[in-house]
Image (spheres, grey):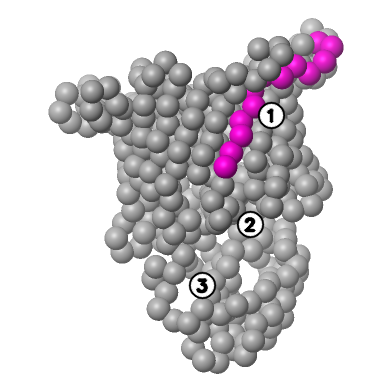
């Protein structure tokens, strides 16, 4: 997954477009079960850059269904001032229909970029990005998604003023514990190799290494460029190392270190870079993981402090049920262990009920690969939910 670098203070159009696109890329990884939804959500992030600038992002949620409605980023000079805002519009099933990126100009928000989503069932099928020009929305690029088991593609189109033209093709392929992202560009009527990312997972589906390579057109070989390595402790990653290949060996570039609370949320993150001998403070892309490494937020700077809110049982008035689901990832069947079990229901991530079982052995063989929600009831009227992965 590409590292997101933000140049705050003068955030350009291309960067804010990348920020929106990164959220779509997260959806691809969720379908592989690498990213799991969590009820632990950010409330506020405070972060600094070495030059002295301070920023904070505040997250706002709907009071009824607690979906994310706004992300407002402010910068601190002599006081906190509005900088940028992302707003979300949803359909009845909770799918994001539109995302708007706005900048604060004078005394009001000004539209800059928007992303419009289409779905095939519960998964994103197409996203169109547009930018605001003189009060009108102008096409910029389009992404078309195709899901086929363990090989998924995202075709990027560019708008030339009159028509859509194919630009880049992103192909995700999973084989066992390795996910490969192949990036190709269109030239001469054929797809040409450009870059690839090889993501390696451990037994618990944690990302332990991402290797970035570029295609050498002259030699027709892949050449190593950069490598990210993740270190885990008690299920969360405490350190991330970034190294660059100099043609003979790997050289240290960045080191990110994190501190967590008792719920597995990264509360504190710091970025360092190598001066050849030791690690010194630096600015970089700091990925803050929350909900036991379930989701991440990226912030550019030298240090980040996070505040979270737990929405786990905010709409649940019944007694909680303790239960266990296995095997995960599921293939064909899952088993539910719960005291005084009554029934189990399977839902999509958008809340659509897919099946119900009065048996603690549930056949999920007809479900496509991805994330689902299981809701388990006992005979006393209690219930609880949990996410699980179908492979």
Q: Secondary structure at mark 1?
A: strand
Q: Secondary structure at mark 2?
A: strand
Q: Nearer the viewer, mark 3 or mark 1?
A: 1
Whether residue 252 is in magenta: the answer is yes
Whether residue 351 is visible here, answered yes or no, is: yes
Q: Is residue 107 left or right of residue 75?
A: left
- Estimate the spatial distance between the alpha carbons at disc 3 and disc 1, rounded to whole Å: 42 Å
Crowding at dot 2, Cα within 10 Å, few <14 / some 14-19 / many 20+, comes out as: many
- Estimate the spatial distance between the alpha carbons at disc 2 and disc 3, rounded to whole Å: 15 Å
Q: Is residue 263 left or right of residue 197?
A: left
- Up the image or down, 146 lies above or below 355; here it is above
- Estimate the spatial distance between the alpha carbons at disc 1 and disc 2, rounded to whole Å: 29 Å
* Residue nearest the observer in this picture, 248 or 255: 255
What residue sits right under mark 1 in the picture? 241
Crowding at dot 3, Cα within 10 Å, few <14 / some 14-19 / many 20+, comes out as: few
Which span is picked out in magenta?
Answer: 247-259
Is tag 3's residue or tag 1's residue first in the polypeptide sequence?
1
What residue sits right under mark 3 in the picture? 353
Residue 48 in picture, x, y percent from top left: 42, 27
Residue 389 in picture, x, y percent from top left: 66, 60
Quarter of the rendering containing residue 184: top right
What residue sits right under mark 2 in the picture? 370
Crowding at dot 1, Cα within 10 Å, few <14 / some 14-19 / many 20+, comes out as: some
- Up the image or down, 24 lies above or below 348; here it is above
């Amino acid at each position: 997954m590409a590292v997101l670098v933000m140049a705050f203070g003068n955030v350009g159009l291309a960067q804010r477009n990348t920020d929106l696109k990164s959220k779509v890329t997260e959806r691809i990884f969720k379908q592989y079960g690498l990213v799991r939804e969590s009820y632990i959500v950010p409330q506020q992030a405070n972060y600094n850059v070495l030059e002295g600038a301070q920023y904070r992002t505040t997250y706002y949620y709907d009071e009824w269904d607690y979906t994310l409605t706004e992300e407002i980023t402010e910068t601190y000079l002599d006081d906190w001032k509005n900088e940028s805002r992302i707003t979300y519009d949803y359909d009845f099933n909770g799918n994001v229909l539109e995302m708007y990126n706005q900048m604060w100009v004078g005394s009001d928000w000004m539209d800059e970029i928007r992303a419009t989503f289409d779905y095939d069932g519960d998964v994103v099928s197409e996203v169109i990005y547009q930018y605001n020009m003189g009060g009108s929305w102008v096409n910029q690029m389009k992404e078309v998604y195709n899901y086929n088991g363990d090989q998924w593609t995202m075709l990027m189109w560019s708008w030339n003023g009159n028509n859509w033209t194919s630009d880049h093709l992103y192909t995700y392929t999973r084989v066992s514990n390795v996910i490969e992202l192949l990036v190709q560009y269109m030239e001469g009527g054929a797809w040409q190799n450009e870059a690839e990312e090889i993501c390696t997972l451990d037994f618990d589906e944690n990302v332990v290494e991402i290797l970035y390579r570029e295609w050498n057109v002259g030699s027709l070989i892949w050449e190593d460029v950069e490598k990210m390595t993740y270190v885990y402790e008690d299920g969360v990653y405490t350190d991330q190392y970034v190294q660059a290949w100099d043609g003979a060996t790997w050289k240290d570039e960045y080191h990110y270190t994190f501190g967590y609370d008792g719920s597995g949320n990264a509360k504190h993150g710091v970025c360092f870079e190598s001066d050849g001998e030791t690690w010194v403070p630096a600015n970089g892309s700091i990925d803050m993981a929350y909900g036991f490494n379930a989701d991440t937020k990226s912030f550019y700077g030298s240090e980040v402090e996070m505040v979270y809110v737990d929405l786990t049982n905010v709409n649940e008035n019944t007694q909680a049920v303790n239960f266990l689901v296995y095997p995960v990832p599921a293939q064909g069947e899952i088993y539910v262990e719960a005291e005084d079990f009554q029934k189990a229901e399977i839902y999509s991530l958008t809340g659509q009920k897919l099946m119900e079982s009065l048996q603690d052995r549930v056949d999920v063989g007809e479900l496509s690969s991805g994330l689902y929600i299981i809701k388990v009831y006992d005979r006393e009227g209690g219930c609880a939910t949990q996410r699980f992965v179908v492979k």
